[in-house]
């Protein structure tokens, strides 16, 4: 989840220092700059435990950067600079619970959106239990094992059921992929690829992931209500989503002939066409990308496909109406 950078001016024995923190975005990890120079962050466990590390050491004060999904602040000699509340170390997971979380995440190797969702959901639940201040270490271990086993059981069972559903849907709607009220129509060259990588997150539901030989595509959904509940975000416009999530300027956002908001991003290895539709009190985000070598040929085609993205009502049985 992206947000604007936060800046603090911190006093130490050797003078003032400017600390600037950039949260992670869709394409970049979190970054920390002190006096304009990037400083290493301990992000190995950040996705689950958050960031809690000392900075500006040796200056005569205990200064720590503390960042969770909900907030980032500087703890200065045991007191947060913004909230003025007392600093408490972020809880850490035991080695055993880390193993349970990693094994839950490994369920994603089964392939597909369903196992990926189960894997990340199980890992999130396992880490939540492991970081709870209300549970004893023994209960954390027991619940960690239970969640890990349930994660794999659900991933395997639902993957089999979803596979049958995908095969049935292919016969009815070739060249399209859908879930709930969302449907994207691409081309006959796309196929269900059962490869969602690390797309699932707390607020985002994976709609689908698909690929051809040259292009990869995936789509996610995040409701306004869930984003506000988890992160305090009150965006309702596609441009707000693209600007804040992808760290782009409003002037970079374009609109297709059918009214889909999108932005083209070019990196060293890949080129992306990222689009958002705001409908049904939710953001429907679709990302199509190819290698940079193919960008000149394929990006116009990706924009053409983006122009054809529609959010439609889909019957419970899974057929588009």
Image: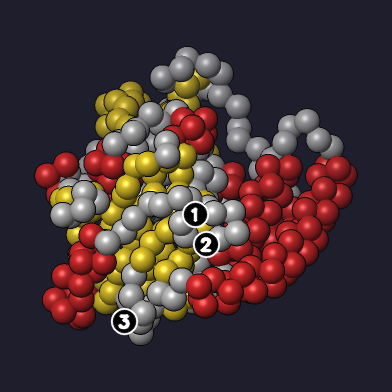
Q: Mark 1 and 2 residues: CB-CB less than 8 Å, in contact?
A: yes
Residue closest to the eye, 238 or 116: 238
Which residue is located at x 17 percent, y 44 percent?
A: 249
Residue drawn at 16 percent across, 54 percent down: 257
Label tally? 3
Q: Is residue 314 above or below residue 112?
A: above
Mark 3 → mark 2, Cα distance in angstroms? 28 Å
What label sits on residue 174 in the rendered view?
Answer: none
SS state under label 1? loop
| Relative side of 120 to 274, left or right | right
Marks 1 and 2 sit apart, C-alpha to C-alpha, by: 6 Å
In the rendered view, tell whether residue 184 sits above or below residue 51.
Answer: below
User: Mark on residue 314?
Assistant: 1
Residue hosting label 3: 214
Residue 6 or 261: which is nearer the viewer?
Answer: 261
Q: Are marks 3 and 1 in contact (CB under 8 Å)?
A: no
Residue 42 visible in the snapshot: no
Q: Position of residue 184 (x, y in %)?
A: 38, 62
Kindly identify which residue carries mark 2. Answer: 319
Rendering coords of residue 303 (x, y %): 20, 64
Residue 182 pos. (x, y %): 44, 54
């Amino acid at each position: 989840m992206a947000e604007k950078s936060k800046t603090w001016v911190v006093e130490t024995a050797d003078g003032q220092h400017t600390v600037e923190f950039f949260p992670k975005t869709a394409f970049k990890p979190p970054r920390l700059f002190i006096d304009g120079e990037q400083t290493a962050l301990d992000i190995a466990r950040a996705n689950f435990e958050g960031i809690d590390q000392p900075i500006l050491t040796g200056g005569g004060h205990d200064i720590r950067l503390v960042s969770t999904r909900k907030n980032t602040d500087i703890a200065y000699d045991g007191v947060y600079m913004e909230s003025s509340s007392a600093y408490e170390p972020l809880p850490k997971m035991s080695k055993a619970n880390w193993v349970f979380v990693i094994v839950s995440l490994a369920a994603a190797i089964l392939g597909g959106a369903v196992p990926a969702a189960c894997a990340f959901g199980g890992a999130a639940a396992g880490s939540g239990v492991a970081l709870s201040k209300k549970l004893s270490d023994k209960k954390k271990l027991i619940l960690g094992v239970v969640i890990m086993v349930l994660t794999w059981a659900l991933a395997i069972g639902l993957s089999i059921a979803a596979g049958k559903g995908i095969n049935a849907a292919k016969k009815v709607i070739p060249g399209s992929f859908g879930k709930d009220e969302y449907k994207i129509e691409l081309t006959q060259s796309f196929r269900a690829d059962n490869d969602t990588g690390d797309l699932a997150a707390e607020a985002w539901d994976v709609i689908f992931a698909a690929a051809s030989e040259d292009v990869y595509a995936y789509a996610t959904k995040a409701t306004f209500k869930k984003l506000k509940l988890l992160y305090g975000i009150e965006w309702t416009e596609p441009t707000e989503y693209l600007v804040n999530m992808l760290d782009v300027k409003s002037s970079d956002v374009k609109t297709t002939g059918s009214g889909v908001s999108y932005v083209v991003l070019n990196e060293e290895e890949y080129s992306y066409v990222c689009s958002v539709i705001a409908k049904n009190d939710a953001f429907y985000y679709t990302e199509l990308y190819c290698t940079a070598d193919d960008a000149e040929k394929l990006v116009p085609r990706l924009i053409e496909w983006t122009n054809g993205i529609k959010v439609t009502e889909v019957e419970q049985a899974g057929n588009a109406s």
